[in-house]
Image (spheres, rainbow, N blue to C red):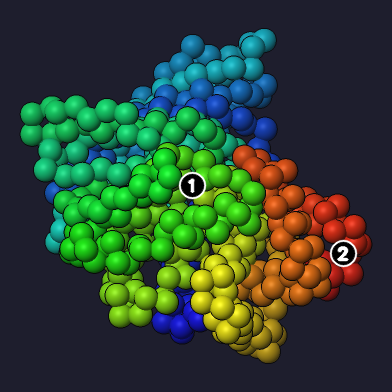
C-alpha cells in the first residue's frame, strides 16, 4: 500500500513544485503553437547561476506573443519579425511586425539564479530540475502546447548530465564538457529537464530500450536493486495502454528532495532509495513516474483544470501494477489508502469535483483530490465496467489520444464508445 510516509511525500511534492507554475496561468488554451525549442545552457554550480539562450520556432497570427520567463533576466531578443519586447508578471511579451506567414523564429538570451524549478545541491555539487521549466528556459508553460526540444548543456568536465531526449554528442571543452540532447517528438515544456552530478550508473537493456539508473550515494548494486522491476513495469504499462514506450532509453535518478516525471527520465527523492531497499514492495513512486510516460507526458491534460487526467491516472496505475505483481490484496490495500485520503478531505467538507473551475491557486487538499480521489474514481469505474470493459476503454482512450491534449469529456466519450454504456450518471456523481 501507499504508506503514510509515501502519501506525505507526494503531498509535499505537489505543494512545493506545482504552485508557481499553476499560479502563472488561468489556463485558457493559448493560440500560440510552439514547434521547437533549441536551448544552450551553461551552469555555474558555485554561484548557482545559469547563462542561456533559446531559439523558439512557433506559429501565431497575433501581433504580440507572450512566453513565461520566471525570474530570469532577459539580455537580448532577436528575430526577423521582432519589433520590441517588455517583461511583465514573469512573462516576456514580444511585439511582432505585420506578416502573412504565421511561422516565426526568435532567439532570447538570458541569465538568472533560479530558486524554483532548478535546484543546486552544494554538498554533492549536483543540479536537477523539477517542473517549472520557465525558471531556467524561456518557454510557454501551457500543457496544451507541445514541442520538440534540443538542449546543449555545458557543465564541469567531471560531471555527468542526463536530460530529456537522446544523447547525440559529448564534446570536451577543456575543463568543461558539452552534452547535446535531442527530443524529436513533441511534449509539453514541463516535461523538459535534466540532472547533473557525479553519479554512479547501472545500465540494463530491455528489448531495444536502455534502462539507466543513477545515484551519487548509492552503489551500482543498490540502484540495480531499487529499480529492479522497471522492465516489468514497462511491459505492464505497454500492455494496458496498447502503446510501446516511445523512446530508446529511460533514465531514473535518485537526487535531491523532489519527484518529477520528465520525457524519458524521472528524478526521485534521494532518500526514497533507502525506503525501497528496506521494503522492495514500496515501488509505487517508481511505477507512478513511469506511468507518466504515457498518461501525462504523451496524453496530457489540455489545461490544469483537468490535471487529474495526469496524476489520478499515474496514481491508479501504480496500484494496478501492484495488483499485477503482488495480487489482489496489495491492490486493495493501495486503493484503501487512496480512499482514506479522499474520505478525510470529504469529511472535513473540502471535497470538490475532479474537474476544477479554477486551478490557479490550488490548496493542499485540492492537490490530494487530484491524485487520490482521481485514482479512487478510476477504481470505481473499473468496478462499474468490469475488467474487460474498463481495460478495453483505457486502451481505446490511450491509443486515440496518444501524443495529444485531452479533457475529461474526451475520456468519458472514449470509455462510453468502448463499452457501449452511457456513463453520464457516473461522471456527474464522481467527476463533475
Residue 67: image x %, image y %? Answer: 51, 36
Counting other residues with Cα less than 10 Å from the Cα at mark 1, is it few (<14), some (14-19), or many (20 or more)? Answer: many
Which residue in the structure is indicated by mark 2? 423
Instruction: Please tell me whether mark 2 sits on a helix, a strand or a loop.
Output: loop
Q: What label does residue 231 carry, if any?
A: none
Counting other residues with Cα less than 10 Å from the Cα at mark 2, is it few (<14), some (14-19), or many (20 or more)? Answer: some
Q: Is residue 380 rendered to the left or right of residue 216?
A: right
Identify the image quadrant of residue 75. top left
Residue at horizontal 39 percent and vertical 31 percent from the top: 182
Residue 145: image x %, image y %? Answer: 60, 38
Sequence-first disc among 2 and 1: 1
Q: Which residue lies furthest to the bottom in this view?
A: 347
Residue 54: image x %, image y %? Answer: 39, 28
Q: Is residue 11 rendered to the left or right of residue 275?
A: right
Q: Distance between the residues labelled 2 and 1?
A: 32 Å
Establish if 299 lies above or below 380: above
Please indicate, yes or no, whether residue 129 appears anywhere in the rendered image: no
Taking depth in this image into account, of 315 and 82 the one nearest to the observer is: 315
Establish if 313 lies above or below 11: above
Q: Is residue 69 rendered to the left or right of residue 81?
A: left
Which residue in the structure is indicated by mark 1? 190
Amino acid at each position: 500500500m501507499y504508506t503514510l510516509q509515501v502519501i506525505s511525500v507526494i503531498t509535499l511534492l505537489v505543494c512545493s513544485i506545482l504552485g508557481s507554475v499553476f499560479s502563472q496561468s488561468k489556463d485558457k488554451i493559448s493560440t500560440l503553437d510552439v514547434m521547437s525549442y533549441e536551448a544552450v545552457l551553461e551552469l555555474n554550480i558555485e554561484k548557482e547561476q545559469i547563462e542561456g539562450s533559446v531559439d523558439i520556432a512557433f506559429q501565431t497570427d497575433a501581433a504580440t506573443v507572450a512566453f513565461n520567463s520566471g525570474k530570469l533576466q532577459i539580455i537580448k531578443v532577436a528575430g526577423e519579425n521582432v519589433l520590441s519586447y517588455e517583461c511583465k508578471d514573469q512573462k516576456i511579451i514580444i511585439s511582432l511586425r505585420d506578416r502573412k506567414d504565421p511561422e516565426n523564429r526568435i532567439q532570447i538570451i538570458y541569465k538568472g539564479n533560479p530558486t524554483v524549478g532548478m535546484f543546486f545541491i552544494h554538498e554533492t555539487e549536483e543540479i536537477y530540475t523539477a517542473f517549472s521549466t520557465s525558471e531556467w528556459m524561456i518557454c510557454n508553460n501551457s500543457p496544451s502546447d507541445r514541442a520538440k526540444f534540443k538542449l546543449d548543456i555545458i557543465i564541469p568536465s567531471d560531471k555527468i548530465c542526463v536530460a530529456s531526449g537522446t544523447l547525440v554528442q559529448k564534446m570536451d571543452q577543456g575543463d568543461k564538457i558539452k552534452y547535446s540532447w535531442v527530443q524529436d517528438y513533441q511534449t509539453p515544456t514541463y516535461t523538459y529537464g535534466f540532472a547533473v552530478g557525479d553519479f554512479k550508473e547501472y545500465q540494463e537493456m530491455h528489448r531495444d530500450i536502455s534502462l539507466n539508473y543513477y545515484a551519487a550515494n548509492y552503489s551500482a548494486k543498490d540502484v540495480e536493486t531499487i529499480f529492479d522491476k522497471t522492465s516489468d513495469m514497462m511491459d505492464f504499462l505497454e500492455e494496458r495502454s496498447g502503446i510501446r514506450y516511445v523512446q530508446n532509453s529511460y533514465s531514473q535518478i535518485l537526487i535531491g528532495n523532489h519527484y518529477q516525471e520528465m520525457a524519458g527520465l524521472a528524478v526521485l527523492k534521494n532518500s526514497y532509495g533507502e525506503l525501497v531497499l528496506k521494503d522492495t514492495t514500496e515501488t509505487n513512486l517508481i511505477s507512478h513516474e513511469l506511468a507518466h510516460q504515457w498518461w501525462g507526458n504523451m496524453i496530457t491534460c489540455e489545461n490544469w483544470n483537468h490535471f487529474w487526467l495526469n496524476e489520478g491516472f499515474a496514481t491508479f496505475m501504480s496500484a494496478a501494477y501492484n495488483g499485477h505483481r503482488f495480487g489482489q490484496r496489495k491492490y486493495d490495500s493501495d486503493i484503501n489508502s487512496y480512499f482514506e485520503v479522499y474520505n478525510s478531505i470529504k469529511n472535513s467538507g473540502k471535497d470538490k469535483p475532479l474537474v476544477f473551475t479554477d486551478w490557479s491557486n490550488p490548496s493542499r487538499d485540492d492537490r490530494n483530490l487530484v491524485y487520490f480521489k482521481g485514482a479512487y474514481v478510476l477504481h470505481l469505474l473499473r468496478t462499474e465496467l468490469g475488467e474487460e470493459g474498463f481495460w478495453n476503454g483505457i486502451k481505446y482512450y490511450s491509443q486515440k489520444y496518444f501524443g495529444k491534449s485531452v479533457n475529461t469529456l474526451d475520456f468519458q466519450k472514449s470509455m462510453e464508445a468502448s463499452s457501449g454504456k452511457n456513463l453520464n450518471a457516473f461522471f456527474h456523481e464522481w467527476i463533475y
